Image (spheres, grey):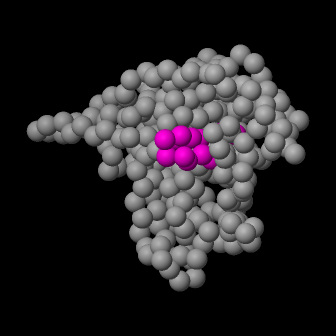
Amino acid sequence: MVARMMGRIVLTVLTGLILTGCGRQVVKDSSKNPDLPAAGPVFASAPRSFLQPSVDAVGGLPAWKQAKTIKFDAIVTALHPDGGAYLTEHRFSLYPWSDAVEVVAGEPRVRMTWRVHCGSCSIEGDPALDGSPLKGIYHEYADAVLQIVTTPARLMEGSVTLTRKPIPLQIAGQWYQAVEAKFQPQEIVSNQKDHERVTVFTPYWTQGTYFQNYASAIADMIWLADPGEQRYLLVRGYDYAPAAGDGVLIPTKIEIFRSDAQARFGSRLALIDLKR
């Protein structure tokens, strides 16, 4: 019932909206080297004024500038298509200013490691030996966690066009402000002694919506989409708490759902509970 109601509300708000691009990001900084996680923040601008409350609510920009790496372990409940639950543990390493995340999963028959960086995914381990329901969706899963945990950094990327919608909407009894996003290719220029290496990264998602919670000001729900590939996800964060030693707040519970072009909730793919 809630999913259907949200679908009708979000569809009403999103229908007819047009996203405009802002060109490609050009960063001349070795910390944005595609082969090396960033040692510090690299972004095109400060938070847009309408997003400043969201950044402040999870620790503020000064704290996020110092958050070079965020690491945590989590208990993960992954769901099979028939609804059966699969319990496992994952170790996450996130690099907010490199748009990168690494996930390590020690499954009974294989140790899997997958890394997502600027829209690309690399995998170590034999997926054929992986009995997890997440097999085949490693990229979507890892990027969903990266998006919801490091939202302040994602919102400040110069390759993202953000448009705040004027009409608030209510979802499951809570009020939200929708901020539409369009993701552009990233062009990264790496300075080297003899020449400059230019790498263009195609975004994994082409569009999305960040939902700012009116009560907390946190953007605690994100719709991610690539209509051309028929790829849609909804990810939600709950129970935000300080990350150890970083001064930033991150969700301690994360839910990842399939979705559709109307941003409706589909089946739940995973529930992630951070160890404390």
Measuring from the top left, give residue 189's x and y in whole percent: 27, 34
Q: Nearer the viewer, residue 31 or 139?
A: 139
Q: Tell me the magenta residue range.
A: 221-233
Query: Horizontal placement of 86 versus 152: left or right?
Result: right
Q: Quadrant of the C terminus?
A: bottom right
Residue at 39% across, 23% down: 23
In the image, residue 149 sits, relative to residue 163, either above or below, namely: below
In the image, residue 169 sits, relative to residue 198, either above or below, namely: above
Query: Horizontal placement of 69 versus 72: left or right?
Result: left
Residue 62 visible in the shown view: no
Query: Horizontal placement of 35 versus 114: left or right?
Result: left
Q: Residue furthest bottom?
A: 109
Q: Nearer the viewer, residue 22 or 15?
A: 15
Residue at 33% across, 30% down: 27
Residue 273 visible in the shown view: yes
Is 105 inside the magenta-drawn segment?
A: no
Residue at 21% across, 39% down: 197
In the image, residue 106 sits, relative to residue 154, either above or below, namely: below
Query: How many numbered marks have been drawn onto this rendered protein structure?
Result: 0
Measuring from the top left, give residue 86's x and y in whole percent: 69, 72
Answer with the quarter of the image where residue 272 lies. Answer: bottom right
Q: Quadrant of the N terminus?
A: top right
Measuring from the top left, give residue 144's x and y in whole percent: 59, 49
Measuring from the top left, give residue 29's x and y in whole percent: 31, 34
Residue at 52% across, 60% down: 138
Answer with the quarter of the image where residue 155 lies. Answer: top right
Q: Main secondary structure of the magenta part?
A: strand
Is 223 inside the magenta-drawn segment?
A: yes
